[in-house]
Image (cartoon, grey):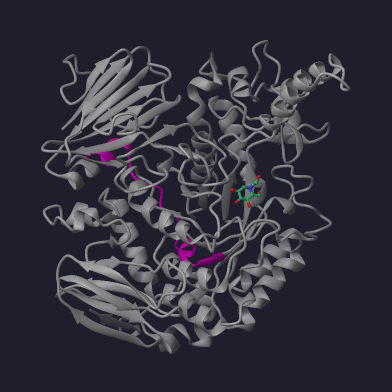
Amino acid sequence: MIKRYVFGEPIGTDAVICEISISTDEINELRYSDGSFSYDMSEDTKVYGLGEANRGINKRGYRYVSFCSDEPSHTEDKESLYGAHNFIIIEDKEIFGVFFDNPGKVTFDIGYEDINKIVITPKYPDMNVYIVNGDDILDIVRQFRKLIGKSYVAPKWAFGFGQCRWSYETSDRIDEVIKGYEENDMLISSVYMDIDYMERYKDFTVSDERFPNFKEFVSKVRNEGIRLVPIIDAGVKIENGYDVYEEGVNNNYFVKDKDGNDYVTAVWPGYTHFPDFLNKEARQWFGDKYKILLDEGIEGFWNDMNEPAIFYSKNKLEEIKKSLSEIDIENDDDKLLDIKWKFNELANNGDDYNAMYHNIDGKVVNHDRVHNLYGYNMSRAAGEAFEKLSPDKKILMFSRSSYIGMHRYSGIWMGDNCSWWSHILLNLKMLPSLNMCGFLYIGADVGGFGSNATEDLVMRWMALGVFTPLFRNHSALGTRNQECYQFTRTKDFKNIIDVRYRLLPFIYDEYMKAVQNDDMMFRPLAFEYSEDKMAIEIEDQLMLGENVMIAPVYTQNVTGRYVYLPENMTFVKFVKDGEIVTEKLDKGVHYVNVELNEVPLFIREGKKIKVVKHSVITDNNLRKEIMECSIEYKEEDFEYIG
Ligand code: MIG
């Protein structure tokens, strides 16, 4: 049962697809006063949700702020990441879900100021609030997911393994990467193109110099079984003669300042304007631009910098320039320090968000009020266009910034994590929370984006990545190379990638089931074994579908880990050379041995999963079809384990 309450005059978000009549009763589940919602927790209260958010699966004990942010350092103290997913489930003696459909900043204090209190405070009061009641957590999730509509379905090839780096800046570099994989007999389905493929970071251009005969190149790579997936950034370069810029200016498709001038920010291309994705016509216009790359044979995209991220704005630079001109640089120490801070605060400055305006159905709306819808509508622009431009062929898309509703058009990646062991665990913890909010095509930068990776870290991370729908190794400019062939134990990496392709039919099935049934592909043990005191506290193991539990190793210099089995299970290990070893284990705590080159999983008693036989996955005649994920396996190609 879902009840809807309206506060003030909500701005339409299109997060919800069902018409729910407005309830005029008071909300029983939460207290509302002075613009905040509150709830008194008991010792046992647990709080789940918030999608792509920091810290635990149980969100209790910290403060989270829904405000889409370009946050490249995911340390424990960070309150905002790239997404805004305002759905939580509170589980006490009673249990209910609540969705705050508010596109401005919303603060979730979940036992932060007062360990026993939840206080949720929106910056702007106007919104719809949905309360979801149900039999249990999974029922509540399903009802919520029905409310927000079916999740995006990625093409099958997007379940293969992908390699990215900032940047492979020429077609030769991409060839080198492909060769690196091929020479080591490793399978790969996609190579990603980061910003340097463009001509001076201009969206929908391809550098002729670095990618001559692009169309031919795309098709050559495609013939090897591999798709190229370019990045698209939100900001459009200001440059006379650049059609995207000129069309945007001429049609008023860009975000404005308060006087109606196109707002000037700067991102990678230098000075830019932001397309007004909240304006329907602008959205359609920008979406249609993707055709330029579809026509080159491209079948997938990742949308970046769409919080939107701002390096600096012209306004803010002018402020600094003025301050500088007014001071005596020999004597005004204090004022100089002030200016130093001003420089530090140029990026993603709230003043810029306050100074930008959208045109929503003819109404001028301040950006800050709708900030969290920006990335969502960038991907929606593309998603709506793909429905027209490519009705028969699914296009891959995932976005950095998001809001609930975007899950119908696109997946997400978890942004700029680091090559830290703790981020393997953070990757795991985000999976179920994102699933609750409708995001199913998801994954993190495997191996870590920032910082230097080590071989063991990448290998352990890959052993988690084999289970996530998006399985992409990605790393930042200036960090150590971390493609699987860059390390010494290439045979072990090959073996782990093989495991992904052997599990692909299973993983794809689980994903499709979750889409069709509005279900979670990844569930915390607490959702499945809610009566089991031990299971409900476990945050480093997850259920994958109905029959499997995963428990990756996420610490360094170990030969295994402790796991808790909430029931009897079969411990399965994919070990070197394609062998699979199984062992029946009883309910309880076990230390399981997992070597660096092994992939562990657990199967519930009496259940089996299907795995492609090693001999099939390593058959060179099938290599291309396997990489394309287009292969139709025959029954005898599978073995059943459990
Ligand atoms: O300011 O395009 O999260 O995946 O490699 C950094 C360069 C911009 C941030 C993305 C990352 C990407 C990088 N981008």
Q: Is residue 231 above or below residue 111?
A: below
- In the rendering, at what x and y percent does residue 42 appear? 16, 35
- In the rendering, at what x and y percent does residue 497 appear? 48, 75
In the image, the segment drawn in magenta is 143-162
In the image shown, does 288 or 12 lie closer to the viewer? Answer: 12
Is residue 148 on the magenta stretch?
Answer: yes
Q: Is residue 407 above or below residue 240?
A: below
The residue drawn where x is 45% and y is 24% is 104
State whether residue 16 appears in this view: no
For residue 515, side relative to residue 455 (left or right) = left
For residue 94, side relative to residue 444 (left or right) = left
Q: Is residue 125 above or below residue 606?
A: above
Residue 463, picture quadrant: bottom left
Residue 177, picture quadrant: bottom right
In the picture, the quarter occupied by the C terminus is: bottom left
Is residue 11 on the magenta stretch?
Answer: no
In the image shown, does 468 or 207 lie closer to the viewer? Answer: 468
In the picture, the quarter occupied by the N terminus is: top left
- In the rendering, at what x and y percent does residue 111 appear? 30, 34
- In the rendering, at what x and y percent does residue 126 appear? 38, 16
Q: Is residue 144 above or below residue 516?
A: above
